[in-house]
Image: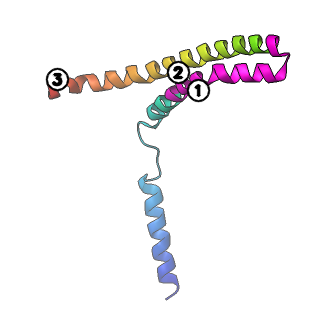
């Protein structure tokens, strides 16, 4: 009697593993790109104040603040640009996949 539940459990586990239920969704990479792009843009908003604060606390007040502002501005621009490019890199292929479906809804 002890072998039957174990065998049934082993067969059920094998069926679940072989059925592909644990596979990643088809659009997982695109969703990850969208979330990463939005995260980069949100992070860009906080990069300038963080750079100013870090520069002020790590160096002489006036020179450190100026250096932190410059560093924060460069980080803000690079994060914002990276976020926009990531969003564009994901949105363009998604729009290309959705383009044939648009006439169905019009």
Residue 43 badge: 1
Of helix, strand and loop, which one carries label 2? helix
Work out whether mark 2 precedes mark 1 in sequence or the reverse, and give the earlier one.
1
- The residue closer to the viewer here, 44 or 60, is 60
The C terminus sits in image quarter: top left
Report x, y in % for residue 76: 61, 17
Pointer 1 local density, CA inside 10 Å: few below 14, some 14–19, many at least 20: some
Q: Marks 2 and 1, how far apart in space?
A: 9 Å
What numbered label is drawn on residue 83?
Answer: 2
On screen, residue 11 above or below 61: below
Quote the CA–CA distance across marks 3 and 2: 31 Å
What span is colored magenta in the figure? 37-63
Say which element carries label 1: helix
Around disc 3, counting alpha carbons within 10 Å, would you say few (fewer than 14), some (14 to 19), or many (20 or more)? Answer: few
Q: Which residue occupies 71% across, 20% down? A: 51
Residue 25 covered by magenta stretch: no
Of badges 2 and 1, the one in the foreground is: 1
Q: Nearer the viewer, mark 3 or mark 2?
A: 2
- Residue 103, numbered circle: 3
Please give the name of the residue rendered at 66% of the width and 12% of the height, measured from the top-left corner. 74
Mark 3 against mark 1, which lies toward the viewer? 1
- Contact between marks 2 and 1 (CB within 8 A): the answer is yes
């Amino acid at each position: 009697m002890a072998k039957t539940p174990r065998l049934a459990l082993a067969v059920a586990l094998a069926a679940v593993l072989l059925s592909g239920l644990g596979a990643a969704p088809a659009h997982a990479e695109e969703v990850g790109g969208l979330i990463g792009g939005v995260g980069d843009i949100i992070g860009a908003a906080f990069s300038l104040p963080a750079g100013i604060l870090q520069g002020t606390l790590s160096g002489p007040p006036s020179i450190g603040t100026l250096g932190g502002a410059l560093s924060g501005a460069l980080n803000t621009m690079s994060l914002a640009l990276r976020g926009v490019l990531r969003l564009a890199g994901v949105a363009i292929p998604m729009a290309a996949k959705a383009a044939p479906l648009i006439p169905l809804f019009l």
